[in-house]
Image: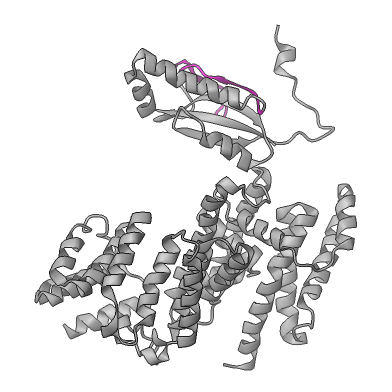
């Protein structure tokens, strides 16, 4: 890694740490989400231009505040009816408005906004990503991201989406909306391959957001469950790719590369969440990953426990994809015949899902039906556009 | 903030209502009345609309105005009524709408706030005979 790249990562971390705080204070003070967001984005762009040259200032928060305040004053001076806000901006100083930050997250993830806009807004406003960084991470044109953000900001203002922590009776539904956004960032980042390493590491942003949420809402076990899930994935990241950048399947991974301390810490976090006795889909998914992470060798995996956890997960959040994962666990806990019976029932809902066909191929191979396995792998290959997964399937096809 | 709630009927909903016995239908109407009573302090206007077959649409985007029979969009979902509400924000509007006991679709549309000093359109009441 070259010097500029190292400072790039540092830059990303510092910006993320402070941009959201700045946004939270500004929205609170000037009461206009769109205008505040513009100021933050402007300050972030200025920082990304100047910090690599001038170095990161000693007080990045104060620096960003100063830039935003100066811009804000310039903008407001041109508008005569903004006198009160002008006065407030003059008094603005860096602070730690944790409630404001939570309001910001809930506004960005409001259910009246489309999912793509929730994600883009959260990354830009809460994590301080630039429009260009978001576009690169999701492989979409910059203009698309810019348009999503503009539309979302207009809707927040024009439709009266409030800047507020939801009422207690709505909190659980609204929190699950926020967790979904973070979970999608994890998925998106988790599946990206080494060649995308230049782009922003979304898993890093997902972990940071989940940990922010845990700090701000310490009594919500699902937030802790999601954080544990993310950390358990990250703890095993070193084993997921070989030296050539190819994806290594769980069974073949070198488990000595896994970060045992991080796994232990994440498992403890999960246990503390479980102590609330309010299980949820993220806690259960984290518990399943913990079963894998705690096994020293593939052969030691506690598949019976995993099947049981999948049953609980299906009870809370039924989905064909979860049933597919349960069937894969059944293959190891019981055997290929039982797993195949479960899989057959999923043919219709998952016909266009590559993992269904890849799992089916493995079962068919177990059952000695090599030709059918080959056809299933081929179907899986047609259905995935992730290069790392394609490589695994191609390797398998060339062996068979 | 002011919003208009657009109540939207579907064919399925109309059929379901048709299939109800008189007592059951009475109870359905009762639930709607109760909803309006529960939110009376926030509802500032509105009305049920006549059936879509009573609608007349005028198109002015050609040379001459073209008058046609029927609503402006032909579809399985038709606007059957509206209510104007005055609430704090979208979340309050959402809370109200989530308890709506009748037709299966409701659109929440904010009204453009009146700007002080702007010329207001004449009140409908003022021009009524």
Inspect the magenta stretch and tell me whether residue A15 lies in it: no
Residue at x 82% of width, y 61% of height: A72
User: Which of A114/B92 is in front?
Assistant: B92
Task: Tell how many labels.
Answer: 0
Which image quarter: residue A375?
bottom left
Give x and y (percent) for residue A354.
29, 67
Would residue A83 be found to the left or right of residue A121 on screen? right
Would residue A136 be found to the left or right of residue A337 on screen? right
From the image, which quarter does the C terminus of chain A lie in?
bottom left
Which residue reaches farthest top?
A: B129
Q: Which residues are magenta?
A: B42-67
Inspect this view and state whether residue A139 appears: no
Give x and y (percent) for residue B99.
52, 33
Which image quarter: residue A368?
bottom left
Residue at x 38% of width, y 27% of height: B13
Inspect this view and state whether residue A370 appears: yes
From the image, which quarter does the N terminus of chain A lie in?
bottom right
Residue at x 10% of width, y 74% of height: A367
Give x and y (percent) for residue A183.
48, 65
Residue at x 47% of width, y 34% of height: B105
* In the depicted structure, whether residue B41 falls above or below residue A72: above
Would residue A19 be found to the left or right of residue B59 on screen? right
User: Which of A397/A63 is in front?
Assistant: A63
User: Which of A315/A153 is in front?
Assistant: A315
Give x and y (percent) for residue A200.
56, 76
* Colouring scheme, one of rainbow, by chain, secondary structure, one colour: one colour
* In the depicted structure, whether residue B35 falls above or below residue A205: above
């Amino acid at each position: 890694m070259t010097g500029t790249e190292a400072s790039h990562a540092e830059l990303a971390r510092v910006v993320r740490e402070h941009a959201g705080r700045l946004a939270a204070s500004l929205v609170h003070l000037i009461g206009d989400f769109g205008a505040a967001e513009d100021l933050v984005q402007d300050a972030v762009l200025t920082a990304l231009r100047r910090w690599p040259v001038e170095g990161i200032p000693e007080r990045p928060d104060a620096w960003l505040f100063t830039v935003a305040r100066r811009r804000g004053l310039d903008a407001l001076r041109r508008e005569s009816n903004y006198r009160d806000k002008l006065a407030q901006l003059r008094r603005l100083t860096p602070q730690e408005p944790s409630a404001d930050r939570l309001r910001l997250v809930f506004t960005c993830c409001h259910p009246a906004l489309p999912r793509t806009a929730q994600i883009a807004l959260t990354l830009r406003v809460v994590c301080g990503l630039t429009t260009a960084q978001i576009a690169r991470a999701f492989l979409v044109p910059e203009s698309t991201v810019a348009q999503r953000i503009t539309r979302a900001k207009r809707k927040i203002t024009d439709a009266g989406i409030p800047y507020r922590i939801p009422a207690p009776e709505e909190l659980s539904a609204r929190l699950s909306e926020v967790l979904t956004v973070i979970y999608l960032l994890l998925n998106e980042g988790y599946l990206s391959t080494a060649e995308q390493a230049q782009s922003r590491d979304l898993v890093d942003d997902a972990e940071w957001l989940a940990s922010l949420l845990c700090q701000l809402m310490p009594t919500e076990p699902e937030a802790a469950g999601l954080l544990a899930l993310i950390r358990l994935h990250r703890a095993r990241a070193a084993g997921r790719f070989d030296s050539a950048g190819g994806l290594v399947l769980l069974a073949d991974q070198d488990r000595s590369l896994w970060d045992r301390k991080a796994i232990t810490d994440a498992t403890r976090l999960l246990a503390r969440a479980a102590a609330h006795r309010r299980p949820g889909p993220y806690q259960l998914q984290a518990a399943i990953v913990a079963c894998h992470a705690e096994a020293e060798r593939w052969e030691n995996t506690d598949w019976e426990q995993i099947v049981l956890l999948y049953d609980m997960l299906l009870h809370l959040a039924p989905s064909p994809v979860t049933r597919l994962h349960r069937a894969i666990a059944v293959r190891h806990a019981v055997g290929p015949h039982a797993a195949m019976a479960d899989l057959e029932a999923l043919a219709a809902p998952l016909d266009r899902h590559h993992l269904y066909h890849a799992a089916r191929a493995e079962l068919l191979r177990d059952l000695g039906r090599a030709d059918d396995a080959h056809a299933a792998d081929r179907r899986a290959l047609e259905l995935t556009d992730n290069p790392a997964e394609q490589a695994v399937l191609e390797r398998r096809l060339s062996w068979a | 903030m002011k919003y208009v709630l657009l109540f939207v009927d579907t064919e399925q909903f109309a059929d379901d209502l048709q299939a109800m016995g008189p007592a059951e239908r009475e109870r359905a109407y009762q639930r709607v009345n109760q909803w309006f009573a529960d939110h009376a302090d926030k509802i500032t206007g509105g009305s049920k609309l006549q059936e879509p077959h009573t609608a007349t649409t005028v198109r002015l985007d050609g040379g001459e105005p073209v008058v046609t029979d029927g609503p402006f969009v032909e579809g399985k979902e038709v606007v059957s009524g509206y209510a104007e509400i005055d609430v704090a924000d979208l979340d309050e509007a959402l809370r109200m709408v989530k308890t709506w006991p009748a037709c299966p679709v409701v659109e929440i549309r904010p009204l453009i706030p009146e700007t002080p000093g702007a010329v207001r359109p004449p009140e409908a009441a003022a021009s009524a005979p």
